[in-house]
Image (cartoon, rainbow, N blue to C red):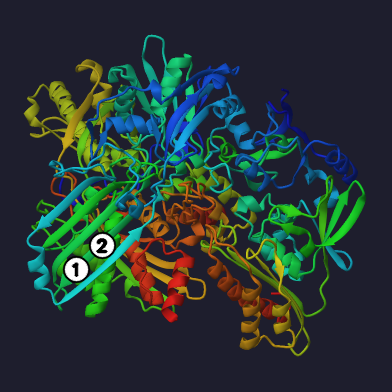
Amino acid sequence: MSEVQYSAPANLADAVALLAGGGSPAVLAGGTDLLVQLRGGRPEPSAFIDIKRIPELTAIRMAGDVVSIGAAVPAAQITEHPELGAVFPGVVEALGLIGSTQIQGRATPGGNLCNASPAADSVPAMVASGAICRVAGPAGERRIPVEQFVTGPGKTVLRAGEFLVCLELPRPAAGTADAYLRFIPRTEMDIAVAGAAVSLTLDAGGVCTAARVAIGAVAPTVLLVPDAADALIGSRLEDNALNEAGAAASAIARPIDDKRGTVAYRKAVVGVLTRRAAKIAYQRAQGGAA
Amino acid sequence: MNDPKAFRFVGSRSIRPDGVEKVTGRAQYGADLSLPGMLTGKIVRSTRAHARIRHIDVTQAMSLPGVLAVITGDDFPDLERRMLPMGEQQMDVRDFIDNTMARGKVLYHGHAVAAVAAVSPDIAAQAAELIKVEYEPLPVVMDLDAALAPQATLLHEDQVTLTMQGPVENPVPTNVAFYMPLKKGDIDTGFAAAEVVLENTYTTKTVHQGYIEPHACVADAKQGGRIDIWCSTQGPFLVRTLTALALEKPVSDIKVTPSEIGGGFGGKLAVYLEPVAALLSMRSGRPVKLVMSREEVLRATGPTSATRTRVKVGAKKDGTLTAVQAKLEFEAGAFKGSPVVPAVMTMLAAYELDHVLVEGYDIVVNKPKVAAYRAPGAPQAAFAIESILDELAGELGIDPIDLRLKNAVSEGSMAVYGPQFKAIGLKEALQAVKTHPVYADPVGPNQGRGVALGFWFNVGMQSSAAVRLNENGSATVITGNPDIGGSRASMALMAAEELGIPAEQVQAVVGNTETIGYCDVTGGSRTTFATGMAVIEAARDAVARLCERAALTWDVPVEQVSWAHGQAIHIAGDHAPLSLDEITANAIHTGGPIAGAAQVNAQDAGPGFGVQCARVQVDPETGYTRVIGYVAAQDVGKAIHPSYVEGQLQGGVAQGIGWTLNEEYIYDADGVLLNAGFLDYRVPVASDLPMIDTILVEVPHPSHPYGVRGVGETPIVPPLAAMANAIAAASGVRMRDLPISPPRLYQAITAQGA
Amino acid sequence: MSRNHVSTTVNGEPVEFLCDTSQSLLSVLRDELGLIGTKEGCSTGDCGACSITLDGRLVCSCLVLGVEAQDRSVGTVEGVADHQVLHPLQQKFLEHAALQCGICTPGLIVAAKALLEKNPDPSEEEVRYWLAGNLCRCTGYDKIIRAVLDAAATLR
């Protein structure tokens, strides 16, 4: 019988030492993916390294030009945060869509990213808002743009002994807002069939001056859609700009057929979501962050 | 007592007797019992959907420390094939054993092949891993087309098609286990008289009852041969019968105690675990607990049939139906016994028809053997007929409720399947929906409403009840029917009504197979009807005893004593009334304890008719359907406890909405279920549904002392078509294949636009 | 094989237990502590029958390791009533007949209590979304939602 260890290190150095110390340790944050996978037959790790007692991983910091969200902050704490939602409404709503209320009490942005599911709800929003991953490991710390973090289903750039500390979001320029929409067959409790996040910046005249569009569940990793952003930039999100952005998202998507949706359906719906999310982001940017 | 206004307690919304235990977490369900020395059992399940078992090697598992018993299909008896009556349905005893644990062949992925009992869950899991099963794979038969193909792989090489009269002429081995025609009049004459004829095919997928509590039991085989079983079941006496059969023991050696039951909907009429746990307990000499995982529940227990129904209707331009012809093909799963027979019988029961031909086929495939699911077979059949009638109403420009009113059966009508209806409230239910806002209010853009009706026979059958009076004038009611939806509240109310004391003074309990006489299963919407009848009779028996004691006290003939409002009354008025508590307090002087008992074999259950209207909004860009309003009307005879009757309607509707929109078994090419969990087997969640309005139509059933008719099953019959009809109205697209999931609806909308 | 020793608080009472590292808190509550009110419906976080609070936060106990409870505060359905007095949610569930089989009821009561502590005046839609992770297959949710709204009004 295996003897699985459990540790809850109190600081980054101890966590690095435990993770780099051999065996096949698993980082335990909210556990909402990891424990399900273990029940489903994933081999047991040599140890659970519970990172929820490390201050850097459990804090939300709003001071300065960079907003930092600890990798192990539960989603519920993020959606309850008094200021975060005003700055990144799309990121917050994306995190708020992960699973049920119960799952929200445990699931974390770090886990959602590191699990590397193509359908992770928070990742398109993080990509659209230009989040940077702060990673700690035996060789010290490094920072990686979030769109480069996941390399394929279940795969990330993390090396042995490395783990995600936090996500750093540059404070957006004035007139910026973001939005995330996903499609699921029910109203709750499903994995995204497709998702789209849009972050855009408007000038005083309501013209879009900058945009980032990211789509999820329609490729092995979340995709940035530059053509969709280009379609929005320079417009006031008139119908033709929205349609063009949606078409660009549909065009770049390369989804699969599975039990949750078909290729044709996902391509079509991701275009619809892109249009709708862009519209919401636009309204938010116009009215301050709604 | 037949005057509904005369009821004092029946019809009130009392607190259920078992309620406090359930809201505080103290109620004990199947998995909640632990016994000293108890072992954990685990079932090893087939990794193939169809294969011959070449060899099972249990030696490694047996030698693992902490393993106390290992069994396989060889440990169960080789019974002669015979049909065992099981109330509503029949079961082939040999199939039962083969489904409990595979012998020779595995017939679905997840089919039990062996079981272990060990001192801990971990060791049981390790032992299960060590059991090596060698399979010879066979081609899998996963749908009707594969099963019916000319050179189809056969699941059972010795199976021929049977009919009610025996094998068909010149029988050959086939996957078609049963054929049933229902004929009335002459179908050609009927269609010749038609001015409009419509014909279409409708399909449904395999869906599961989806009870939240997985199957669970504890078996404790005592030295000397007796076995105690604790389990979550709809039928403790059925568990006793089948376990006795599987262990070749007399039923008198087995005591079955039903735990609280966490949902069943027919699925816990099937017996899977108890014979296995009992045999493991016999082999190990220790109590054994077996609890299924959610995955096991979905892979290996009772879904209901995937179906294909071809239906053709003929009508006059005024909407009068002239003929209906239908062919129903039902998947049975791995063993014969789909609900195609009730499907055939219920399909047209709501309509006046002179010319009918409905043919049903029961077809085996490599999926788990189907189990009963709430009005078995009726929802699939109703989906076809109620959809095509909606199409007919559209074609003829007739309001869909008017079309049904024109053809609906009423008191005195001869049901297509045989009997003559007594008083029924179908037309009243249709009228009630017609004026309800969900139907009558205007519809907005991308919105639509859809109507459908449903029928279920309901059954009576055997029940026992005991009413015991306590010395303070309170009462205890004992029945043998597991309470799956609040039936103890109804039993207490009916006993209270007869005894003339408030329901709060009546404790209703569910006994075990030794504390109460035989009761058929909690199923067929029979409990409040038939077991309620036994409770009423038992209470009347107790009242007769109370009157005798009063007569003795007063020294008058018993004929001079009557009972009213909880008191014995001297008819001539020479003595002051004696209240129930006065009589029980004095019982020691008048002959001792007072009780009543009754055993019934209730006949002539009142049929249930329901009419429902769904209102939906469709997002044409995603194919997403949102239910924005729903009303369910039903003739419930007499609602003993209206809240729990409403709850039956609301629950049936919710299940039907799930069946329509998203629930389906998704298999890969090898017959492996891909969505064996609540993540991707998508039952409705709270935010998916609106409030579900109910209208209780009360046309008393003449064959029950209070007018009760069963209510639990009918509500799941109409929703499939009501929803599909609403979606057709909202989207302009007629969906004839379930589920109408967003990708499917989107595709259909797109195809229509192209 | 050595088991982990955990000290925690359950329903306000100090509790110690031994558990395997991979053992879920659900299993600890049911199998080690005899608190069978917390139910197992799926073990994958999809049904909510095992809902508890951990440091006041609503979670599925099937997706928490027993060892994680060290120095935390666990709340289960057994701690909802005040000794012999039912919580208004429990009373309203009974009055509204908001349970049929009752297997989902403990999880729903724990979840609804967490909602009302955070939001004493929720809308119907807020109740429905908050409880979307608590599957009920019997009731169609109608009476559950009404019971929660009524309990909220009583508590205000």
Q: Is residue A235 visible?
A: yes
Please state the chain letter of the residue tagged with numbered disc 2 in the rendered image: B
Residue B46 spot, x, y in % from top left: 47, 36
Q: Would residue A277 be found to the left or right of residue B745 on screen? A: right
Please state the chain letter of the residue tagged with numbered disc 1 in the rendered image: B
Say whether marks 2 and 1 touch (CB < 8 Å). no
Which SS class for mark 1?
A: strand
Q: At label 1, which amino acid type do we have? A: Val
Q: Residue at x 53, y 26 (%)?
A: B131
Q: Nearer the viewer, residue B285 or C134?
A: B285
Q: Is residue B372 above or below residue B289?
A: below
- Outermost right residue: A140
Q: Nearer the viewer, residue B94 or A141?
A: B94
Q: Which residue is mark 1?
A: B313
Q: Which residue is mark 2?
A: B310
Q: Is residue B478 visible?
A: no
Residue B407 spot, x, y in % from top left: 15, 67
Q: Residue at x 19, y 59 (%)?
A: B348
Q: Residue at x 31, y 70 (%)?
A: B436
Q: Nearer the viewer, residue B263 or B46?
A: B46
Residue B82 occupies quadrant: top left
Residue density around tag 2, few if under 14, some if 14–19, many if 20 or more, within 10 Å? some
Work out which quarter of the rendered image holds the C terminus of chain B and state it.
Answer: bottom left
Q: Would residue B662 be found to the left or right of residue B352 on screen? A: right
Residue B222 occupies quadrant: top left
Q: Nearer the viewer, residue B543 or A225?
A: A225
Separation of marks 2 and 1 at Cα, in angstroms: 10 Å
Q: At label 2, which amino acid type do we have? A: Arg
